[in-house]
Image (cartoon, rainbow, N blue to C red):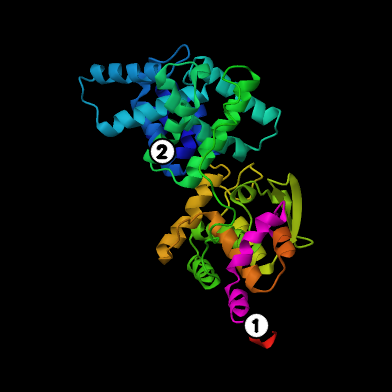
Amino acid sequence: MFDKIFSLPSAVARHKAAPLSEERRRFLAQLDRQGYKPGHLAQTAVDLLRLVPAIQLLADGVHDTAGVEAVIARFVRQRHGRVLPYLRKTLRRLLKQWLRFFGRWKDPTPAAGPLWTLYRDFLNWLEHERGFSVGSLKNRKYSLLTFLRWWEPKNRPLFCLRVVDLDDFLAACHAQGLSRVGVLNVANATRSFLRYAEIRRLCSPGLADAFHGPTIYSHEGLPRGPLWPEVKRLLAALNTGRPSHVRNRAILLLFAVYGFRAGEVARLCLDDIDWRHDRITVPRTKQRRRQTYPLIPSVGRAILRYLKEVRPKTHHREVFLCLLAPVRPISSAALWTVVANPIDRAGIKLLHRGPHCLRHACASRLVSEGFSLPEIGNHLGHRSADATRHYAKVDLPALRDVAAFDLGEVL
């Protein structure tokens, strides 16, 4: 491995002769397999050589954050404090990576106590009994933590929780600046958790039914997304040779043309694209089924260019990967940045700038082209007509025709 990183024989000999040479070689080989650039590997090898004394202090046992910080402090004292700030930061990062690689890193102890035990049991129940998807489980977990972190400092058992406490909790959410939709999501997650606690007889009966978040009226707002000319401008701005633009343009086309959700694009695999028959199959998260679409030539060309020119060589089967090491499938959260950054650069003013705004743009275009609501709902993968009916209000030309209709000619 050292022969691959360094060209000078003296450098190779120095790294091989230093302590822990075999361990350092294996560690660097793992970074190489993860797709790190040669320059990064060379710098890491040099840093490891400098930090061998600190690594030797962690030779045995399993260590956590406190143990790593103690070793860093000892390493600094041995050098009488003459350690550059960048090296301290590098030491902290490398020691944690080193311990994880050799299986000697101890993850932080999960929060203890009856409340957190119930919380973990609840998440396990949602996953295995209710069949929640990874994305839904993550959202429910994030919303519920807002309530748990508010209630835990009070040092009272959950059975002491009253409706007036829940009213105070909603007021605290509002004071934190959460939107009405955000408060509603937190309230729904908390109510679900309280129902589970009632089943376990760990809170007052009827408490969940008495807890309600803010009212969000059905179809109270128009779906907000960029206009189709703005979408074309976004795609044109990404039609360059930069690797990130090549990848991101293919992603934006899937959002804008097919209206896919972020999780569906993130989980799209190489086997889901049938190049011989020009078809693409997407795993519909909410419907728990797979849906096949014709692969439009412009979308197919964008994906093919990404696969040939940009996509790193890896064992991962997901189509879209991170371009920087460690190479891994791109996450749904990262797709928000993929969409939001081009929108910001284009100066398009939108309240919500994530992947869902392009889904709205796709639906609005289909409405303006005269497709029926059932056809649009099938294209978007909606489970019910109610979800699609929202877009009936964005057909402004048709609404103007209705408003201009002269009843006098009929009566």
Q: How crowded is mark 1: few (under 14 residues within 10 Å), some or many (20 or more)?
A: few
Checking the image for residue 69, the label placed there is none
Residue 250 against residue 405 in the figure, above or below: above
Identify the mark nearer the N-term, 1 or 2: 2
x, y (%) of residue 160? 49, 18
Prevailing SS of the magenta stretch: helix
Which mark is on residue 42?
2
Q: Residue at x 29, y 34 (%)?
A: 86
**Tag 1 residue:** 407
Residue range in magenta is 380-407
> Is 287 left, or right, of 107 in this rendering?
right
CA separation, marks 1 and 2? Answer: 80 Å
In the rendered image, which quarter is residue 410 located in? bottom right
Residue 66 screen position, x and y as percent: 37, 17
Amino acid type for the residue under numbered disc 1: Leu
Q: Does residue 304 appear to the left or right of 186 in the view shown?
A: right
